[in-house]
Structure formats: structure tokens, C-alpha cells
Image (cartoon, rainbow, N blue to C red):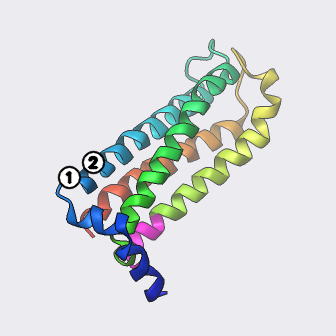
């Protein structure tokens, strides 16, 4: 495992991000901007699923924001992977990083269950009607998970 991590860190990208004055901060800025779009779009949808803006159909809002969410997530993941190459062994040895990755996985599973289940049958509550408790619970869990991911991302700078 140590050999693989050393190979990742010794790659051209890993060396460039460690040695260049501007490379890591630029990639990190891209990562944070993309992540802001991810979390911002998810929270807007989650707030709708919690009951705000009931006149706006949840399916229309989801159809509008989810392509932006997925595109921004791809950018955030790629920029995060790039930053990982610079300090792979440090990140893998950091419990906060492991927790952050686990929280992202949990948020993805939560979203997958929501969209594969309750969102497919949203016609009954899509606009103006009471939102099922399981949908509201998934939205609240989503917000909590993504805020926890943000907290872990910030803590990485200090651990």
C-alpha cells in the first residue's frame, strides 16, 4: 500500500501540485466552487422537500437542479482526486478524511434511495400537498450529511 501511495504522490500531477506555488490553490478553489454548487443545489431541493415553496413542483425543481448537481459533483470529485495525488498518504492516514468520504457515500446512498423510491411516486405530493414523512426525513438527513461533509473538509486543513 505504501508503494502505491508513493507512486501516486510521485506522479507528475502529485509533484506539480506540491511544488508549484499556484497549482494546489487553483485546484482547491475549483474544488470548493464546484462543491458549493453541489451542496447549494442539493440544499435548495431538500428545503423544497421539507415543505418550503410548495407551489413549485418538486419534480420540476429536481429536473432543473440535478443536472447542475451532477456536473458540479464530477468537477469536485476530479479536483479532489487531483488534490489527493499531492498528499495521498497524509489523507489516507487522516480520520477526518476517511469520515468525509464515508459521509459523501452516505449522502449518495440517501439520495439514491430517495430518488429511486419516493421521488418516483411524487405525483401525489409534488405541488401543494403534504409531503410524506419519509421524504422529509431523507431531506433533513441529506442536509445534515452535507453540512457534516463541509465541516470535515474544513477540519482537514487543521488535522
37 to 130, vertically: above or below: below
Based on the picture, tell me whether residue 93 belongs to the magenta stretch: yes
Q: Quadrant of residue 69?
A: top right
Number of residues whose C-alpha sits closer than 10 Å to that of mark 2, classed few (under 14), some (14–19) or many (20 or more) = few
- Image coordinates for residue 64, horizontal then vertical, percent: 61, 23
Q: Around disc 1, counting alpha carbons within 10 Å, would you say few (fewer than 14), some (14 to 19), or many (20 or more)?
A: few
Helix, strand or loop at mark 1: loop
Q: Describe residue 52's horizontal placement relative to residue 3 as left or right.
A: right
Q: Are marks 2 and 1 in contact (CB under 8 Å)?
A: yes
In the displayed structure image, the side of residue 159 where residue 98 appears, left or right: right
Residue positioned 34% across, 76% down in the render:
90
State the residue position of label 1. Answer: 22
- Count of numbered tags: 2
Residue 80 lies, in percent from the top left, at: 42, 56
What are the residue bounds of the magenta stretch? 91-99
Q: Position of residue 60 (x, y in %)?
A: 67, 19
Amino acid at each position: 500500500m505504501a508503494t502505491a501511495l508513493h507512486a501516486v504522490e510521485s506522479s507528475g500531477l502529485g509533484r506539480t501540485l506540491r511544488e508549484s506555488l499556484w497549482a494546489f490553490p487553483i485546484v482547491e478553489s475549483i474544488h470548493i466552487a464546484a462543491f458549493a454548487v453541489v451542496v447549494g443545489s442539493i440544499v435548495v431541493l431538500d428545503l423544497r422537500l421539507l415543505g418550503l415553496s410548495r407551489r413549485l413542483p418538486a419534480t420540476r425543481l429536481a429536473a432543473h437542479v440535478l443536472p447542475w448537481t451532477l456536473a458540479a459533483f464530477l468537477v469536485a470529485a476530479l479536483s479532489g482526486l487531483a488534490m489527493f495525488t499531492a498528499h495521498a498518504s497524509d489523507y489516507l492516514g487522516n480520520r477526518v478524511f476517511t469520515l468525509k468520504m464515508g459521509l459523501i457515500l452516505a449522502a449518495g446512498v440517501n439520495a439514491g434511495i430517495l430518488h429511486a423510491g419516493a421521488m418516483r411516486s411524487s405525483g401525489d405530493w409534488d405541488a401543494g400537498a403534504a409531503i410524506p414523512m419519509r421524504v422529509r426525513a431523507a431531506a433533513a438527513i441529506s442536509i445534515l450529511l452535507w453540512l457534516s461533509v463541509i465541516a470535515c473538509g474544513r477540519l482537514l486543513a487543521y488535522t
